[in-house]
Image (cartoon, grey):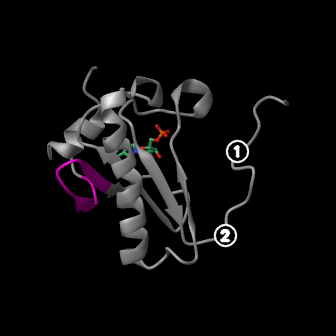
Amino acid sequence: MSETLFTKIINREIPADIIYEDDLSLAFRDINPQAPVHFLVIPKQAIATINDIAESEREIVGHLYLVAAKLAKSMGFADDGYRTVMNCNEHGGQTVFHLHLHVLAGKPMGWPPYTDKLKV
Ligand code: AMP
C-alpha cells in the first residue's frame, strides 16, 4: 500500500503528540479532537482498511484494543468509560488509509454516534 501520513508519524518524519509506543503499535493524540480525550492507536505495520486485515494480522489488531484499555487505565478514564471507533472506507468516514483505532473519552457520548447523511 502507499505510504500515508501515519507512516511519517511512525518514522518521526512529521510531528505528533505521541503518548505510547511499543513494538507493534503507536498511540498519539488526534489533531482534531472530537472529545476531551481523543487519541489514535495504530499498528506500525501498514494495513489500509479493516477490509485488508489478513488472518495473520489478527494479533496486531487485537493488540490495538489492549493498548487502548491499558491507556484508558493509566490515563484514568477506564472506569468512567470511553468509545473506540474504527472507520472503514467512504461510508465509514475513513480519511487516512492506515488502520487506526479512535479512542474518545472524557464526557458521556450519545448514541447513535453519527449524523445521518441519508435517511435509512
Ligand atoms: P478517519 O477519519 O477515521 O480516517 O480518522 C483520521 C483521523 O486522523 C482524524 O480524526 C484526523 O483528525 C486525524 N489526523 C489527521 N492528521 C493527523 C495528524 N497529523 N496528527 C494527528 N491526527 C491526525
65 left or right of 107 in image: left
Secondary structure under badge 2?
A: loop
| Image quadrant containing the N terminus | top left
Q: Which residue is labeled 1 in the image?
A: 114
Q: Which residue is labeled 2 in the image?
A: 108
Quarter of the rendered structure image containing ligand 1: top left
Q: Residue 108: name its quadrant.
A: bottom right
Q: Which stretch did the figure color magenta?
A: 16-27
Furthest toward the right, the residue is 119
Q: Position of residue 88 (x, y in %)?
A: 52, 31
Q: Residue 29: name its quadrant.
A: bottom left
100 left or right of 20 in image: right
- 91 to 60, vertically: above or below: above
Query: Does the residue at mark 1 contact the one at mark 2 (Cβ under 8 Å)?
Result: no
- Around disc 2, counting alpha carbons within 10 Å, would you say few (fewer than 14), some (14 to 19), or many (20 or more)? few
Q: Position of residue 73 (x, y in %)?
A: 41, 75
26 left or right of 101 in image: left
93 left or right of 37 in image: right
Q: Is residue 114 visible?
A: yes
